[in-house]
Structures are given as structure tokens and as C-alpha cells.
Image (cartoon, rainbow, N blue to C red):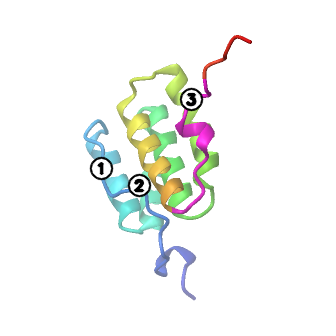
Amino acid sequence: MTKPDSRPVEARQPSPGVSLALPQELRGVAQLIDAGRFGEARQQLDRSSDQPADLLELMRLKLSVAEHVLEPSSAIESLLSFLMADPQNPTALELYRELSRLQYSSGHSCLSYSHPPPPLRDR
């Protein structure tokens, strides 16, 4: 019997850039995700409990989107809490850009995410 993780799956890939802000171990996870090797990425994430919790969660979001378990728009909603806590978090910013590009390229971008509302006019 073949394990579900061992068969090739067309990955819903954000751009294959790997953040240098990630520790080496989590960079390896990101590379596995980008290569579509989700089972290995999940196993490595499970073995990475000594890594910062916020970075682990960001990698789980990336994996969930790549596996088509989570829509990019839902992942962006979760990602916003990271950015509200630390607007300069380089890993969160990079993942936000990747997910935004993915959402745009799939034709599912939302103008409310990419454009501020027009200024109010006095009447």
C-alpha cells in the first residue's frame, strides 16, 4: 500500500524563495515544501520542536497551502496576526508576499487587500 505522502502531488506553490531569516533546519522544511515533498516536510516540522513557535506555525501555514488544505486567503488571514504582532517579521512578510502572488496568479485576489480605501470627501 502506498502512503498518501509518497505519491507525487501537484503542489500549490508559493514562489520557491527560501527565507534567509529562517534557521537552517526550517529553511530545509521550506525547500521540501517548495519541492512538493510534503510528507518529508511534515516529518521534519514534527522533529523541529526546538525551533521558535512562530516560525513553526508559519511553516505549517505554508505547508497547508501547498497541500491544498488551506486556501491562500485563509492563510493570509492567519498571517495577519503575525504581522500585527511584529510588522517587520521577515518570514511573515515573505510568506505574505508569496501568498498574495499565489492568490493573484490564481485570479482570486481581493482588491481590499491590495488597495487602501479611497479618502473620504467632504460634502
Work out which quarter of the rendered image holds the C terminus and state it. Answer: top right
How many numbered marks have been drawn onto this rendered protein structure?
A: 3
> Who's the residue at 48% across and 60% down the image?
105
Q: Is residue 117 magenta?
A: yes
Q: Earlier in the sequence, mark 3 or mark 1?
A: 1
Question: Between 5 and 61, which is closer to the camera in this rendering?
Answer: 61
Residue that mark 2 sits on: 44
Magenta stretch in the rendered image: 106-118
Q: Is residue 51 visible?
A: no
Image spot of residue 98 (x, y percent): 42, 49
Q: Earlier in the sequence, mark 1 or mark 2?
A: 1
Residue farthest to the front? 123
Work out which quarter of the rendered image holds the N terminus and state it. Answer: bottom right
Image spot of residue 108 (x, y percent): 60, 56
Q: Amino acid at mark 1?
A: Val
> Who's the residue at 37% across and 54% down the image?
29
